Amino acid sequence: MDFNDSTQEAKFREEVSAWLNDNVPSAKEMNGLDYLEKAKLWQKRKYDAGWACIRWPVEYGGRNASPIEQVIWNQEESKHDTPESIFVIGHGMCAPTMMSWASDDQKRRYLPKLASGEEVWCQLFSEPAGGSDLAALRTRAERDGDDWVINGQKIWTSGAHYSDYGVLVVRTDPTAQKHQGLSYFFIDMKSPGIEIKPIKQISGSSNFNEVYFSNLRVPDAQRLGEIGQGWQVALTTLMNERAAIGGGGGGVNFDSVFDLAKKVNKNGRPAIEDSQVRAKLADWYVQESGLKFAGYRSMTALSKGEMPGPENSIGKLVGAPKQQDMASFALDLLEASGSIWDENFSESNGLFQATFMASPGGRIAGGTDEVMANIIAERVLGMPQDMRADKGIPFTEIPTAQKT
Amino acid sequence: MNFEFSDEQQLLREQAQSFLADNCSIKKVRETFESDAPYDQKLWKKVVELGWTAASIPENYQGLGLSYLNLCVIAEELGRALAPIPFSSSVYLATESLILYGSEEQKSSFLPRLASGELIGCFASDETRADSSLEGLQTNFSNGRVSGEKIPVADGGIADFAIVLAKKEDSNSSAFIVDLNSPEVERIPVKSIDPSRDQAKLVFHDAPAEELGNQDSGNIILDTVYDRAAILFAWEQVGGSDTALNMAKAYAMERFAFGRPIASFQAIKHKLANVYVKNTLARSNCYYGAWAISTNSEEIATAAASARLSSTQAFYFSSKENIQTHGGMGFTWEFDCQIPYRRARLLAANIGSEAIWQEKLISSIEANKAA
């Protein structure tokens, strides 16, 4: 056992590190740019030098890199202060779906511009009536000549307001069983018939949107998969949620709470000397190190050219509630001042308050804690699916809040 | 990145699993558990024949001189099988104490006999109701003899010798080797929360003793031995924790209620998913421990505490939720759920509680950050 790179990996890491050192945009270069411009500038620079989407085929702008090289790239990039990415969904979920289901012409047209950051993509899946139960979605598509006419509403669409294209699942046959009446399209987000309304989150920011379709026309040529095959295509998208290994995480972690406990007093002594504080910190430390070393085990599998084991599936289920609990604990350490969220006054510019308010989202986005626990129970432990009230009947006859 | 056991170690794991399936089924464990026998002597003899007691002993003392990674694999599999043998006392504690601190003469005398199974060792530190530190140590050493009482001593009723922590005349503590078969040693059996493992009270009436040949104080010996042992204990715990999870899952799949297997209810699925998560975190920390002990890393204190703490928590959680998943049947003597539950408590109590390892962990992190 060792934590060392193989000779080949070390050489790759050196090459990546050298390129990053020379090319990460300086603060001066980014001065005056908004977050979209910054993100696009950095992505274009990577693309021009062959460092964008490195696992993709060369013809689409990648460099055919291996999974372990992707992890090494992520680790090295996370050492730098780079612009926040707006391409995670496009690169991580839309592109793999296009690679599996789009025509060669479409791949040549869309993938290189995704890689270069020239075009941004979003994912239009969840609806007010279908989140964890995605296949309950109701947005309708009806055939009209060579087009489909789409009406309905999507929700929680991150980045819809700055996206050029989006992938979309809709219901094309309401009389079929739930999963069989769906079809999958990609759409031009600038088309007429699309209205985007930002959703204000409890944290105060607005990263995602409601997207309304009124008689949006989409050419049939932009359908991915057969009519009625939308669920299978959607699974390709969902399976490609990036494995959260390598790279670093932001927000509150062991180190930030440990440092806080050294700064603040509890009962007249530094909080870090309090045995309860120490016990809590110890419990979080072993969660954090457990995740880190689970990641190392996955990297080992990748390094050997194998698939990572199921240990990789626990990251979000452990990490998201942990962030929330640690932020809450940190605010408790701050006593009365924990209730103040003022960047000019708050400890660490309000990091703990910001994490406290953002972390409930982490437990919901990309699969709730409960959905993640189901996935572990079913796919890792092999336990049976829950009994379902919607199996084997047409979509129109499934009980809802309105018609139980 | 190579954070995995080698092919040779995986082969050892397969051999260990098949050997233990034949020789240490849960039915066999229950035989020891329900009998007056303090351990499964037949199993112990076979474990010795497989060379497991010799694994970490250097070759010049007739050991196998294998990597500590091999010992981690053995520990996990013995833990998984809930093996009722004094392996942890004799190998992780007594043998390791001698390897780390024994004089040349002591090593030459003891290690070959530990390797061959001629001797079983144990480790006698605790002596009060609730203090595992050496602060209030009452056992004394003077003129080559120890006096005092040690309770509880895991496997103290079956071991041939003990490593005994005692105070010297200058009131510094140290570790001593005491022959438990000498007439000045009284062994009093005590009942254990886990009857498949032996526990005893040892009373030393001026029993002949020799100091482990070393310069370190008792506290340093205790910390060093416990850090290394903690990693091996943690592997046993994580193995046992997997067994509790598998018991719960197997029962949930075959037990029907409301016309369906209880494994299809989210209440049960989420429970066992949480058990799996805790086991996975613990196992990953154990990997860190395995790396640290096999490379003599300077990070061993942090690695040991991480592995030990998360495995202790995982095994308690899985063993109690295993009973819960079984419902009323899990509370019956006839069902086996009590065995991992009891073993989890025993292993959690050996070598220091959760609170002690939480404190050790944060202290070691503070020391690393200060360095």
Image: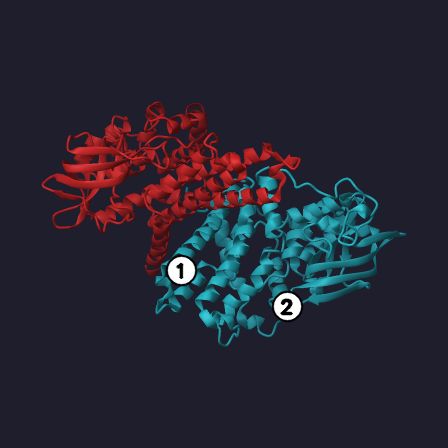
Identify which residue, A272 or A107, lies in the foreground: A272
Q: Which chain is red?
A: B
Q: Is residue A16 above or below residue B212?
A: below
Q: Residue at x 14, y 43 (%)?
A: B141
Q: Which of marks 2 and 1 is nearer the N terminus?
A: 2
Q: Name the residue under label 2.
A: A37
Residue B27 left/right relative to A198: left
Residues behind callouts 2 and 1 on a single chain: yes
Q: Where is residue B243 in the image (x, y as percent from the top left)?
A: 47, 35
Q: Which mark is nearer the camera, 2 or 1?
A: 1
Q: Which residue is drawn at 39% across and 55% down?
A: A279
Residue B352 higher or lower than B204, as above or below: below
Q: Residue furthest toward the right? A: A145
* Local SS, label 2: helix
Closer to us: B81 or A73: B81
Quarter that holds the N terminus of chain A? top left
Q: Using a 10 Å C-alpha cutoff, classify the residue at mark 1 as few (fewer than 14 neighbours), some (14 to 19) or many (20 or more).
A: some
Colouring method of the image: by chain
Chain hosting mark 2: A
Q: How far apart are marks 2 and 1 (CA)?
A: 43 Å
| Coordinates of residue A280 in the picture (x, y in percent) | 42, 56
Q: How many marks are shown on the rendered structure?
A: 2
Q: Could you say where residue A243 lies in the image, as x and y percent from the top left?
A: 57, 49
Looking at numbered disc 1 in the image, what kind of residue is underneath it? Val
| Residue A249 visible within the image | no
Q: Position of residue B173 (x, y in %)?
A: 19, 48
The chain letter corresponding to cyan is A
Chain of the residue under label 1: A
Mark 2 surroundings: few (<14), some (14-19) or many (≥20) residues within 10 A = few
Q: To which residue does mark 1 refer?
A: A277
